[in-house]
Image (cartoon, grey):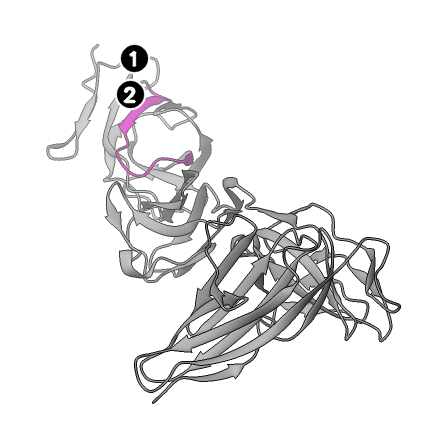
Amino acid sequence: HPPEIIKKPVNQGVRVGGVATFYCSARGDPQPTVIWRKNSKKIVLSQSRYTVYDGNGASMLRIDPVRAGRDDAPYECVAENGVGDAVSAEATLTVYEEKKTPIGFPVITQTPTIRVIETGHTAVMQCKATGSPQPKIYWLKDMKRVDMTNPRYSINSEGSLQIDNSEESDMGKYECVAENSVGTEHTKPMPLYVKVRRVPPTFSRPPEPVYEVMLGANLTLTCVAVGSPMPSVKWRMGVDQDLTPENDVPVGRNVLELSNIRVSTNYTCIARSSLGVIEATSLVKVQSLPAAPTDVTISEVTATQVRLEWSYKGPEDLQYYVIQYKPKNANQAFSEISGIITMFYVVRTLSPYTEYEFYVIAVNNIGRGPPSLPATTTTGETGINSALAYFHPSYGSVGAQSTR
């Protein structure tokens, strides 16, 4: 397909010292190249006031600043692709002296200023213009036309450019262009700086240090972290078992569902961004009844009292111990001593020369555990010193041998 010009440059009137821009677009197959001529001579871009921006069949010629007597001329856009003849379109630049602009020439009454904003915020580049007819306003960014198909960009009724939810890519130099049938006026390019807010990760909702659950219970652990950039959040069990797949790490929030919990385990939430890594560890503690005390031994037996000692190897966090005892063959309820916080106790006010059985029970905040194996002994006779009696669960008991 031979070249065809689909957007032709238009005549322009510009003040001395102002900016002139000519636009030209062409199509064809292959895509045509576009060159510019002034007074039928190819423009040499070594002239620093002349700049050409090309892209995808479109071309823009910018003259900045415009000089009187040198830039007044016809400018021609020429498109060729090696198929058929080259095609061209022409427009004329008229340069006006400072004080001699024609009636109705655009006057920009409010110009943009340097703006600094954070990403995600709204930026407004101000611009207002008067003229007759009322000038149409458009915007350039880094000397190229702002793409108004971007839904974040809008121009209000006066001509100001609004950029919503700004991104780093919005950073650049913006200029407002006011144009009517009389002439064209540019503002000076003004920079918009978009700062990326940089905040290391922090936990806005860390997991609790300890969760106490019953055996077989379910639990949901939630971890929320914030920062800029937003951190990824993952869970680890124990020392090194990752629970979040590397290819699917959520950002900002991670919920861990635990079911049928059998053992106490540490779970660590890890929040990570380019600015750092933070961790918070929770102990998920399975609550259970205490184990039975072991190695209950009896010593220091007299007619009315005995000393008990025992060991305990079960879960910690006991509240106290309970001793239950009664005469071995008596058909009566156990007596009980509660609130014991040591692992020994002297039971008093026993009946002389009576065989007793003793049990020790551990208690925690869940309740009472199972009783120990029984320890049995016979108290001494009244008024007689009793020898040492001892007990071992595997051997049964040995009563005190009285001495007369």
Is 315 part of what is drawn in magenta?
yes
| Residue 178: % across, % down | 75, 65
Looking at the image, residue 105 sits to the left or right of residue 37; the answer is right
Mark 2 near mark 1, Cβ–Cβ under 8 Å?
yes
**What residue range appears in magenta?**
303-319
Task: Name the residue that disc number 2 marks.
Answer: 380
Q: Residue at x 43, y 74 (%)?
A: 57
Is 242 part of what is drawn in magenta?
no
Which mark identifies residue 325?
Answer: none
Q: Residue at x 73, y 53 (%)?
A: 16
The reply to whether residue 360 is in sight is yes
**For the residue marked with disc 2, what is the amino acid?**
Gly
- Label 1 sits on a secondary structure element that is loop
Viewer-proximal residue among 399 and 137: 137
| Residue 86: % across, % down | 40, 81
What whole-number distance in Å separates the C-alpha atoms at marks 2 and 1?
7 Å
**For the residue marked with disc 1, what is the amino acid?**
Ile
- Label 2 sits on a secondary structure element that is loop
